[in-house]
Image (spheres, rainbow, N blue to C red):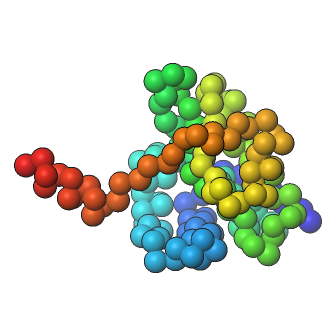
Amino acid sequence: MEYTIREARKEDMAAVLNLIKELAAYENSSDEVEVEIEDLEKEGFENGNFKCFVADVEGTIEGMALVYFRFSTWKGRTVHLEDLIVRESMRGTGLGGALYQKVVEYGHENGVKRVEWVVSEGNRNAIEFYENTGADIKKNWYTVHMGETAIKKNLKKRR
């Protein structure tokens, strides 16, 4: 199988959104995807809020990795890997590893001191893969989210 890992283009965002929706369905969270193609196009290509790499297999986008810069008070600028997704039918082909390597290279090329991401504790295959690449799984840290409803409720309490 021949493939290319490359930077995504604006016209790839429909395929990227399909991969995002496929991941959400896999996680039983299809109803949580609110982002639309226009959001991806605007935030990635007009506002520069993220960089996306795609796995192009003979003209079809079969995987993606979406990253953006963050700032750590301990390390300085870091790269956050928001999602790395490979179409279910293409898992086990090396696409995920190639996308992952591209993200690591991107971080190195940009001089960051850390590449970071979140992995579900139930995703044993990914955890094992990441550990085998030298990544440190922080088991004593929690990921915290405050959704739109909680944000609004929090703000009302402050007024």
Percent coordinates x, y for residue 124 in the rendering: 75, 57
Answer whether residue 158 is visible to the viewer in this image: yes
Q: Quadrant location of the N terminus?
A: bottom right
Answer whether residue 98 is visible to the viewer in this image: no
Percent coordinates x, y for residue 100 in the rendering: 74, 48
Image-based side of 118 in relation to 144, left or right: right
In the image, farthest residue toward the front: 140
Picture layout, residue 116 above or below residue 13: above
- Give me the residue at 26% from left, 55% from top: 151
Image-based side of 6 in relation to 20, left or right: right
Image-based side of 94 in relation to 123, left or right: right
- Give me the residue at 78% from left, 42% from top: 131
Picture layout, residue 70 above or below residue 121: above
- Give me the residue at 58% from left, 68% from top: 20
Which image quarter: residue 56?
bottom right
Which image quarter: residue 86?
bottom right
For the residue pair 157 and 81, the one nearer the viewer reads as: 157
- Give me the residue at 46% from left, 24% from top: 73
Percent coordinates x, y for residue 88 in the rendering: 75, 73
Percent coordinates x, y for residue 48 in the rendering: 46, 45
For the residue pair 13 and 20, the one nearer the viewer reads as: 20
In the image, farthest residue toward the right: 1
For the residue pair 99 and 58, the one nearer the viewer reads as: 99
Which image quarter: residue 57?
bottom right
For the image, the number of numbered tags is: 0
